[in-house]
Each structure stands twice: as structure tokens, then as C-alpha cells.
Image (cartoon, helix red, strand yellow):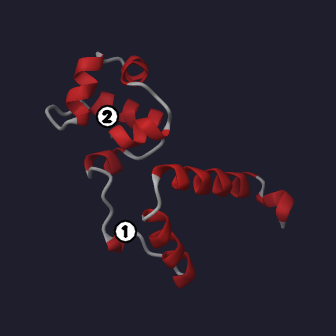
Amino acid sequence: MKNLRQEKHLKQEDLAEKIGVSRLMLGKYERDEASPFAETLQKLAQVLEVSADYLLSDGKKSEKSLKFGDKTLQTYFEKIDKMSDEERGHVKFILEAVVKNKSQMF
């Protein structure tokens, strides 16, 4: 959760305010010292742009849940997974631009 928050360039205070909890409580969520109620979990998922299942699984995906029909894509994602946060941010920016503008590109 902390990594997702940081990817969104949110401070604990900012995210806590968006989901209606204290900064201290958010810190407990991030350290796995407490679990959010279902309503708070949904707000977290919405703000962080992931599913509640993703948050509940600690952001871990099994290989079975990441299947690509194209082996080349699988290889790219494995390489991206090994990049620094900054490098992944650049890749994400490029992918978002491609997806957003796909109708103009093809």
C-alpha cells in the first residue's frame, strides 16, 4: 500500500484525508498493524486505482493471475518488474499515453 501511495505522489496525510481516516491509522494499515473496514478498503482501492483484492493480497500476483497470450509481453513485464520505481514510472507514463491515444495511433 505504501508503494502505491508513493507512486501516486501522495503523503500519508493526503491519502488519509481522502479515505476518511487519521494519518496514524493509515500508517498502521501500511505496516499491517491494522486492517481497514470494507468501506475504507473500497475507498483506498479507488484512490490508489487498484482492486480491493489487489490490496488484500499485498499487491502480490501469482503467475497464474498474470497470463499473457503473447510471450513477448510476458518478457517485457518481467523486465519492467526489475526496474527502479522511477523507470517503471516512465514506462507507465508511456503506456498510459499509448492506451489513451490508441484510436489516433492506429
Identify the amino acid type marked 1: Ser
The residue lying toward the viewer, choosing from 49 and 3, is: 3
Residue marked by disc 2 = 41
Which element type, helix, strand or loop, lies under badge 1? helix
Q: Horizontally, is 19 left or right of 30 in the view?
A: right
Residue 18: give x, y in percent of width and height: 43, 21
Q: Residues within 10 Å of mark 2 (few under 14, many from 20)?
A: some
Residue at left offset 45%, top offset 72%: 78
Which image quarter is the C terminus in? bottom right
Residue 70 visible in the current orientation:
no
Residue 39: give x, y in percent of width and height: 31, 29
Q: In the image as oriented, which residue stretches furthest toward the bottom?
A: 71
Q: Horizontally, is 72 left or right of 48 in the view?
A: right
Identify the amino acid type marked 2: Leu
Using the rendered view, name the quadrant where residue 67 is placed. bottom left
Q: Given contact means CB atoms under 8 Å apart, are the residues at marks 2 and 1 in contact?
A: no
- Image height check: is 26 above or below 104? above
N-term-proximal mark, 2 vs 1:
2
The residue lying toward the viewer, choosing from 12 and 16, is: 12
Residue at left offset 23%, top offset 32%: 29
- Image height check: is 27 above or below 32? above
Residue 51: give x, y in percent of width and height: 40, 47
Residue at left offset 65%, top offset 57%: 95
In the image, which disc is placed on residue 65? 1
Q: How many marks can you see?
A: 2
Cα distance, mark 2 to mark 1? 21 Å
Q: Horizontally, is 101 left or right of 52 in the view?
A: right
Residue at left offset 54%, top offset 55%: 87
Residue 98 visible in the current orientation:
yes
In the image, which disc is placed on residue 26? none
